[in-house]
Image (cartoon, rainbow, N blue to C red):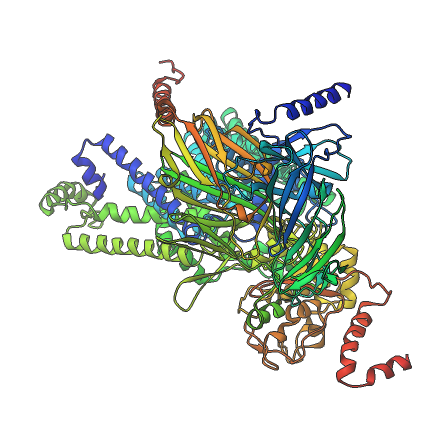
Amino acid sequence: MKTSAVFSAFLSLLSLGSAASSEVKSSSTSTTLPATFKPPQVFKNANLVHVISVEKNYVKENINVLVENIEKAAQHEYFVPFMADQMARLGGVEVKDRKDSTAGPFVAEAVEFDQESDIQYLRIRFPKPLAPGASQTLGITYYLLKAYKPLPASIKQEEQQYLSFSFSAYCPSAYTTSKQKTEVKFPTSTIPDYTKLPGSGDAKEFPLKQGSKLTYGPFDEKPAGATQPVSVRFEFNKPVTHVSRLERDVEVSHWGGNVAFEERYTLHHRGANLSALFNRVKWQQSQYYQPTTFALKELKFPLRVGSADAYYTDVIGNVSTSRFRSNKREALLEIKPRYPVFGGWKYPFTIGWNSDAKTFLRKTAAGGFVLNVPFLEGPRQQEGVEYEQVQIRVILPEGAENVQYHTTIPTQSITEGDVEIHRTFLDTLGRTALVIKARNLVDDFRDRELTVTYDYPLMAILRKPLVVFGSAMAVFVGAWLVGNLDLKIATRK
Amino acid sequence: MSADPLQVLASAGKGKNTRGLLRVIILALIVAAATASRLFSVIRFESIIHEFDPWFNFRATKYLVANGFYNFWDWFDDRTWHPLGRVTGGTLYPGLMVTSGVIYHALRALTIPVDIRNVCVLLAPGFSGLTAIAAYLLTNEMTPSPSAGLLAALFMGIAPGYISRSVAGSYDNEAIAIFLLVFTFYLWIKALKQGSMLWGALCALFYGYMVASWGGYAFITCLLPLHSFVLVCMGRYSTRLYVSYTTWYALGTLASMQIPFVGFLPVKTSEHMPALGIFGFLQLLAFLDYVRSAIPSRQFQTFLWIFAGAAFGLGLLGLVVATSAGFVAPWSGRFYSLFDTGYAKIHIPIIASVSEHQPTAWPAFFFDLNMLIWLFPVGVYLCFQQLADEHVFIVVYALFGSYFAGVMVRLMLTLTPVVCVAAAIAVSALLDTYLSTKSPDPEENQAVEGAEGKKGAKSGLKATNKPMVGVYATWGKGVVVSALAVYLLLFVLHCTWVTSNAYSSPSVVLASRLPDGSQHIIDDYREAYQWLRQNTREDAKIMSWWDYGYQIGGMADRPTLVDNNTWNNTHIATVGKAMSSSEEVSYPIMRQHEVDYVLVVFGGLLGYSGDDINKFLWMVRIAEGIWPDEVSERAFFTPRGEYRVDGEATETMKNSLMYKMSYYNYNNLFPAGQAVDRMRGARLPDVGPTLSTLEEAFTSENWIIRIYKVKDLDNLGRDHSSAAAFERGNKKKKVTKKRGPRVLRLD
């Protein structure tokens, strides 16, 4: 206990002292701080605009804040507070300088201090310290998964689905905020319920409603940690698709000149449950009269051009309701679940396809190989898709070494990256597999790339044919030797 | 030896070696053809397990692979036969699962990690290749003609009678059992011919494997003693017979008793008694043989009579006592139905309800065996001409097999090997005779005849002067050979056609054609099973007719009340009763069995004939067998004796749970008054049935599977019908009559 406290104190000291020097791509993205930690009041939020988008089935939040260093020393760490339950659902944090897009990387990572505390912090580390009195405009973007509750929780098959979402009208901040406003963007202008707040300034009452947008604020100065809970309820007659686990395998074959993809989805619908059980007659009729529904009917996967041999199966075999169009311009895989997926229902499935290795694989001048594949290639749906757990496994050929990877996915979402051994067809040593685990991603990241570099020596390339040839020869020689043995019991003559 | 084209080719080469190589190549090609012709369903659909029973075998195999052999052996499956459960390890033939488990692990060891499903799907085609080789070996024991074996292998490889049970995905016991059957017979013949203990032991080994694989092992258990008995009756008792039979029986019986499901049956049931009897009989014969060599023949006569009488009397007495005391079980019902085809229909409807237990219709023989069926008697006749011990076997097998194939459709399978062997003997005899390019020379013949004539003249009878028999005319040869070639080609065409059209449907997936000719797959079964699997509780009990038990267990992974392992007639009758009674009667039954969902198959929308309404009478019959007072088959027929589902249907029919579940909500799919059952061509009443104790939970896209949820007890303590009536009444009150409230007030 004591040593760990000392250790953590030391660590925090270290990180305070030499933040810039550590440019680690470590697998863990959290740092331990003492349990009594409170962000030092060294900043002031001069102006803050909080944009919450609930247009898709995850929440995208964007905090644009002008921070001022009010301390005498230069500062390089800015803390953003989150509720403890939000922290587990938080993903894809990206921080930019709104004024200067070239300003180096802002590193965002969760701070580990008191597990019990309601408030948890995300620490943003500036690329270069902010001088006393200077100010900087931060653009903090992040996503919250599993953010909504259907209200009513169960509805009839043909009814409209409404979701509710609770948040704070004052943007949660660890610092005093002089001026702020919160905008909420909705998918439609049907927002039957929202919390009304007494207005200030020229507005009589908050929020202001403009089409499918609600605006709370501007508010005057609020102290650090001020909250004002509000909730909104809005129409969302689309499936609330939630992938609780996605396993994506990318298998590279140098001999076959092929990169094979396979993705296994565990898909849930987090929307409203059915109040009466599924009625096929109504469903069939609604297909003609009122095609929009909150049930998930179809998923569309735009794959890379040149993809081939797509398949779509689930645990009991092939699913015939899919269409794959592959031509020079596109490769679109359209799949339908076996049954329409309503709220509370689950539908796990597997898809896969092949691609020419030339599209993804390149040999470097130094003799190594570079593989560049999309990190995510999930469905592109109008309503969006969220992924809670993602595991990418890049299976390289047997004998590949010096594996390194780089991805443009926000580091906050990457939880683990390991090199493992995967044994499959005709392997003696097993294939090198790079396993990357990520969490809380959304389909906005589907075009982000994953670059893997590795070496693949000639002997490793020749290993498999030699092993197969050798063992076949061994069998033949063995058979010949056994065949030559005389096992007959000699009869006396 | 005469020459077929192969040998002509071969003789052009280096003789024996070239022939051997050619034979191996041909055999390999036959094996490839046998395997390939069974892959229609994989190519057309996918690598999927077919039909019903294979789903259980597949599930058991998965369990074996996942949990190891000993756990499999001790497996108690609580997900079937709820609430009874099933001691699966002790009530199945493990041969099939163990075989695929061994193949699976062997491939893994060779670093080829194939999915267990693919091992299971491709097991039957793989083993049919082996069956072809076994048929080749068996036939080679019968005839010196080297072509007969190859023909037999070819016939065996593609005969539809065997393909029907061994297409890819048909992962049933028969998949490996037919190979074992033929191979055991081959080893038996080999043992008998050589009087070899080694071959006898091998025969016993494969017999043991067969016992571990298929209930049809009784066929071997009865056929080998019968063969021996016939040989003895023909006066062909020999030490060869003694050695091979006793070796086989002693080791084989021991081997068979290792299977928990068989256990002590070989010494306890009547089906196994012939084998035991012949075993004893052979001991007596051996003893007599010994005595005869030891004492003079006159005394031996007396001794023989006394001895035989005493032995027979004692044996009979022993059997009667053992049977009446219960040591030996009398013949089982299934066995009786083999002798009286009407027996099952009266006494055990559950056996009769299975279509493959019906007597064979005669066109089935032509369908399944095509030209082999008329070549078959020729082959048997040719066996009579030589009639060595092994030919007697073919004759006995042919008689025995033909009889059983006539009794039960399913046993066509055991007839097929002997048909193939006999037909191959016939065809090869024809080919050998007519394919000889060398015509006998009449001149030379004359000379021979002349030489013989002198000897013949002494006997004085002209009839004894044999003219030289041979085919002289080349055109005659040409006609016969080309006719035979055409027949063989037609046979191949027929086999391919039958395999492709009749035997390659997975039956889980139905194929239909869209107007533009493209294939459309109707996948309702899996749609519903997947829904059950994903969206119901892990231990939700599903009630359905027993046909779907294995599929629900395999695909939906949910506990079932009854399944295709029909060992408990009463439990099945309970389900039958629940389906055929009114809701008031069914609901308590379902509650008692903790049923959560009820699954029915309905073909009315699509015109699918294998649905539950068509099977319904069997449910009624089986339920009636147990509860004759409560369920009556007559009540489901109109006074004119028709089985109707439309407005004219009887009240019992309309009130039965099965009828209600099938047609519930169905009329809403059509404009008023136009609801039609396309399967039975019946126009349904305007007002559909109402359900009060069940609610519709899921219906598949083409309505083939309908799943209902059993309602929990009413919250207000009302019974379900009044609760449902209240709900309906609420809605009705506004629009229609005002009778509702008045009735309430009266109450």
Q: Which quadrant: the N terminus of chain B?
A: top left
Q: Image point 67% across, 76% down: which residue?
A: B688
Q: Is residue B263 visible?
A: yes
Residue with the most extreme right position: B746
Q: Residue furthest left?
A: B443
Residue A164: horizontal and vertical position, in percent? Answer: 70, 57
* Percent coordinates x, y for residue B362 in the rendering: 45, 62
**Could you say which quadrant of the image residue B438 lies in?**
top left
Q: Identify whether B295 is placed above or below B744.
A: above
Image quarter for residue B495?
Answer: bottom left
Q: Is residue B406 left or right of residue B649?
A: left
Location of residue B740 in the rendering, given as x and y in whole percent from the top left corner: 83, 81
> Considering depth in this image, is A466 or A489 the residue closer to the camera?
A466
Q: Position of residue B569 (x, y in %)?
A: 69, 55
Q: B585 or A108: nearer the eye?
A: A108
Residue A106, compared with residue B691, is above or below; it is above
**From where the camera sits, is residue B623 visible?**
no
| Count of numbered tags | 0
